[in-house]
Amino acid sequence: MIFVKICGITRLKDAIAAADLGARALGFNFYKNSKRYICPENAAEIIANLPGHILKVGLFVNSSETEVEEINSKLDLDLLQFHGDEAPEFCKKWGDKVIRAFRIENEQQLDEIKKYDFARMIIIDAAVKGQFGGTGELSNWDIATKAKEYGIPLLLAGGLTPANVSEAVKKVKPFGVDVAGGVESSPGIKSKEKIRAFMHSVRRGHTG
């Protein structure tokens, strides 16, 4: 089974359902302009009730170093996902806890990945002008496949759903997949049925 991260968790019942159905990591979105934003206090309540094997990921978009460090320390996060315009020097402060997201439009932009060779994982997401992810638009799977050549474990994101994730996994063969809107009934509200269907499709794609 490949690594599955479910992002934009806002409710404990959704977190427990995702964990029970096989997700390896859960993402908490601390970007205040996101429709999936969760305040650190509410995230802490959910995290306190998670099974120990679940990786807790904080998602940040152009946050200050102070804000990231405060939330990271308070919630004892396992991974920090930077989804904005954060420079390598900024991200490197957190060493191997970093997941760096890229919204890449063409192959020429792939070399940007080299600057983040310290990252634990990278995410290839859809490139939508003025948006920092969570758009529901498909990422470019050909570009994602080429991004694997940089040798950093790759999470494929961008418009994944139970209907297309099997094909995506077969084509890209990523380290893992990252989903938010594709398993929701409305923004921030996950559907247990959609999570189950998504996980089933991931397994089907992984086993061929």
Image: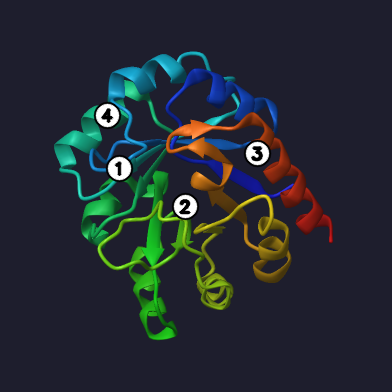
Camera-side residue of 32 and 47: 32
Q: Are the residues flagged by discs 1 and 4 in contact, CB closer than 8 Å?
A: no
Q: Report the front residue among 170 and 148.
A: 170
Callout 1 amino acid? Ser
Q: Is residue 193 left or right of residue 63?
A: right
**Residue 171 to residue 68: above or below:** below
On the rendered structure, is 89 left or right of 111? left
Residue 174 in percent (x, y) is at 63, 61
| Amino acid at the residue labelled 3 | Lys
The circle on residue 120 is: 2
Q: Earlier in the sequence, mark 3 or mark 4?
A: 4
In x, y percent, where is residue 152?
51, 63
Residue at the location (52% across, 58% down)? 159
Q: Which residue is mark 3?
A: 194
Ranked by sequence position, the earlier of labels 3 and 1 is: 1
Question: Which quarter shows the C terminus?
Answer: bottom right
Disc 1 marks which residue? 34
Q: CA distance from mark 2 to mark 3?
A: 28 Å
Q: Which residue is mark 4?
A: 71
Closer to the N terminus: mark 2 or mark 4?
4
Which numbered disc, 2 or 4, marks the residue closer to the eye?
4
**Relative height, residue 187 to residue 173 (above, below):** above
> Which of the two discs, 2 and 1, labels the residue nearer the N terminus?
1
